[in-house]
Structure formats: structure tokens, C-alpha cells
Image (cartoon, grey):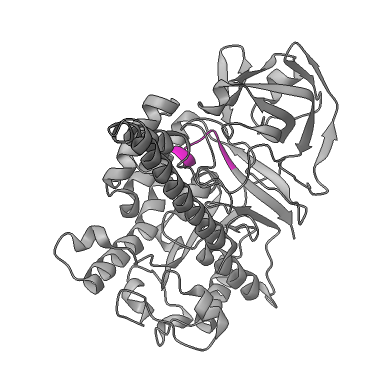
Amino acid sequence: MSRKQALLRRHRRNKRIGVLVMVLLLLVLGIFTWWWLPLLLLPLVWAGHEAWFADHLFYTPDQDYVYQFGEQTHRQALTVHDGVLSGCSDCGEDDTLILQVQVKANWFGRFLDPCVELWSDARLDRQTFERGVDGVRFLNLSGLAAPLREGRLRLRGRHCRVLGEPQLWLTPAVELRQRRVMVIAPHADDAELAAFGLYRQAEEAWVVTLTAGEIEAEHYQQMGLGQAEAAQLKGRLRAWDSIAVPRWAGVDEARCVQLGYFCLQLPAMHADPTRAVGSREAETDDTRLFRSFNGFSLPGDVDGVPSWQNLVADLRVLLEKARPQVLVMPHPQLDPHPDHHYGQLAVLEALQGLAWQPQTLLCYANHLHDNDRWPMGDSGDGVALPPQLHAEQAWTPCSLQLDLATQRDKAMALGMMHDLQPPAPFKRRLRRVLQRWLAGRRGSPYGENEFFRKAVRRHELFWRRDL
């Protein structure tokens, strides 16, 4: 069981215990007072839970975030007067600027999402944190170098206070536009969620999708299909998405590749590298079902066997063919999804012994162990650093800025992804209504799926290593 699954199981167990205790207390209250009082309070308690306690937050908001930055990142002198930041005379427009601050929520910040507002003239950015926050957090000031140099950048807490003396961490920009970029996506939409802005601006971009993402096809079963038929249809649609949607950003379809391995089966493939591991739901063990849109053949096309051995061989051929200078893939520590974790292991194994090696490695996290809502806040906001409670390794932050036009194009790319189109379940829609009324949360103007809120932002955040 992964750490993420263990945390989720513990969270659900504690929630069931809490619900049971609450029901017993209300029954006792009804017995010794008025019988109708529990009937009145139960809906109110449930509404309060959905509005304020339904987030999957597996740590307490008063814990500090902890980061160890790489050698390329260094601390810069900064002055603060009445909330106005100044200094950093040598920071450039494309540099990654991270501000370490102490954030403490006020009483309102326990019921409404606290955020730090960054003002420069009429320009406003918000970066949001957990309700009840009381600890060290890391703001992303990338793109605000000019007002910071000129003493025009103001910090203001909303439902919170910024305490102590902030510390600025600066990472000089690395060239990304004039280089060959390969994005490794475990599923169709991972490349767009994490790196649409990056691969759109690259001189040459490749998008390689590892799995068909065919499982959990209940939406297609509602059309009258059986489980296997629905899974095959969903896999074919997502395979098409992985080839077609990057065209929206100008990526030639010849540089978009779908490997067609099966969702959530990479761990089993890794455990026994020569064994064929078929789909959980599509009743097939032939990857060629989902490879028909590729423009050239790969080693795995010979027999269609879904094995780790074939996956690594496919990746080796692609790396040798594309010769990427920048390789983008899931973060090995921050992103807990099993396909993401084992996908990056397959890439690292494929790189071993190759004559061509990328110069820069960029890692992203589309999922987190500890907080399913990150990035918190609204579409269009900046992306603060994610929660991390233990700094096991040093990583260098790399933040890419997205203007409003690029954000809108990114939102349209996500809207083309079939997996983000089905409507949310009724309970989730009701929860969002309660959160909007009681907790002041807004939905995304671009779409109903939660990834429209989380991914369409002013920044795309990566973690960099120079190889």
C-alpha cells in the first residue's frame, strides 16, 4: 500500500469514527431534550462538514513547510517596510523567485480560505493556503521581479497575517524556449496539466504518453456498454486525445506518441519485467489496441506485450530518436500516483547506457500525498510551493510564467480531454454549492472539473536538476 493510500484509509477511518460519535451525541441530546432537535441539527452538521472539513488534508495547518533548495538557488537580501518589499537588484524577469514567510490565519481564516495578496500598482496575485494556517509557507514571486526591484511590491494578508522577516530565494532562469523538450505523461492530460505552457513555447516538443488510461469508464457504461467495451472506448478516446490535443499548442502529431500500456498496471510490470500485465477492465493484454494513431513503429509493436521490458525498450528508442535536451516527468517524491512514480522509474532505467543524455531534468507533481486541493485558490492565481513536511533531497524550483492568453489556451486544451468532460457526481456538486455559500470558494470559469481550477494558473511549477 502506498503512503497516499494509507493516509486516505486513515482519514476515512477517523471520519467514520467522528460521524458515529456525533450521531450518538445527537441521539443522547434528543433523548434528554426535545426529540426533534437531532433531526434539525443533523443536516446542519452535515452541511458544515461538507463546507469546512471535506478536504483531504493529511497534516495539521500549523505545521511548517520544509524545503532544501539546490545549489543553483541562493538567498537574496530583502527589505520590508509596512508590507512593501524591495531589494533584489539583480533578479531577472525569468528568474524563479520564492519568498519564505510565516503565515498565521485570523479567526475568519479558519472558515474562509486565507491568502496572501501581492500588489504591484493595479496588478494583483493571490496565493492561498490551508484554513487555520500557522506556519512557514513559500510564495511564488516569479514574474514580479520589476516591482520587487523598484520597491513597488506589497504583501497583504487576507484572513491571515504575514509575520516576521521574509526571506527571498532566487534561482537564475534556465533557457527552455530554444531547446528540444520531451514531456513524459503517464496518462493523457498529464502533459497539459503540468506543462502545456512549457511545451507550447519550446523550439521542438515531444509528448510521450505511457498508458491509455482506460479504467474507471462508468461514464461510458451509462451509454449501454459493458465494462470491457466501455474501457476500450475510453482508452481509444484518451489515446486520440494524447495525439490530437498537443496540436492545439503547435506540436506536430509525428512527435506525439501513445505507448498504450494499461492504467495502474505499471507497478505490477515493474515487479516482474518480462511478464505481460493486461488491463484491469478492458479484457485485453495487447497494447496495440491503443497505438493505432502513432506515426512510426516501436519495439513494443512487434508483439503488443504489456511488459516492463517492452516499456523500457520503447522509451529508449524514443529518447534516441528525439534526443531531448530537456526531459519533463513526474516528481519522484512529491507525486504519489503509482503510474507517475513507476513511469519516471521507467524513464530513468531507459536512460541508462544511452549515448544521448538530456541536459536538464524538470519534474512536476499533478498529485500530492498530503493535500488533494493543491494548488489552493482560484484559476488564474499564482502557484505557491506545495506542502512538504520533510526535505529528503535538495531540488531547485523552476517556475514558468503564463500570460492570460496562454492560460485560456491551456484551459481549452484541458476541455478537449475526454476524461475531464463528464459531469461531477451529484454529491460533489452539492458540496461545491455549500462551499461557495459558506466558505466563499469559487469554481473555475473554464470548466467543472477540479483540474481547471488547479492547473490553469499564472505559473507552471517544476523542480529542476541539471544532469
Residue 447 visible: no
Residue lying at the far front in this picture: please name it.
32
Residue 175 visible: yes
Is residue 423 rendered to the left or right of residue 155? left
Residue plotted at (35% across, 64% down):
239
Is residue 387 rendered to the left or right of residue 451? right
Q: Which span is picked out in magenta? A: 453-460
In the image, 278 versus 202, the foreground residue is 278
In the image, 101 versus 7, the foreground residue is 7
Residue 238, x across and y down, in percent: 34, 61
Q: Is residue 252 above or below residue 403?
A: below
Residue plotted at (52% across, 89% down):
274
Q: Quadrant of the N terminus?
A: bottom right
Marks counted in the figure total 0
Residue plotted at (41% across, 86% down):
302
Q: Quadrant of the C terminus?
A: bottom right
Residue 25, x across and y down, in percent: 43, 41
Is residue 58 rendered to the left or right of residue 288? right
Q: Quadrant of residue 222?
A: bottom left
Asked if residue 457 is among those painted magenta in the image, a careful observer would answer yes
Residue plotted at (60% across, 69% down):
347
Residue 39, x across and y down, in percent: 29, 35
Residue 106, x across and y down, in percent: 62, 21
Asked if residue 160 is among those painted magenta in the image, a careful observer would answer no
Q: Is residue 364 above or below residue 446?
A: below
In the image, 84 versus 351, the foreground residue is 84
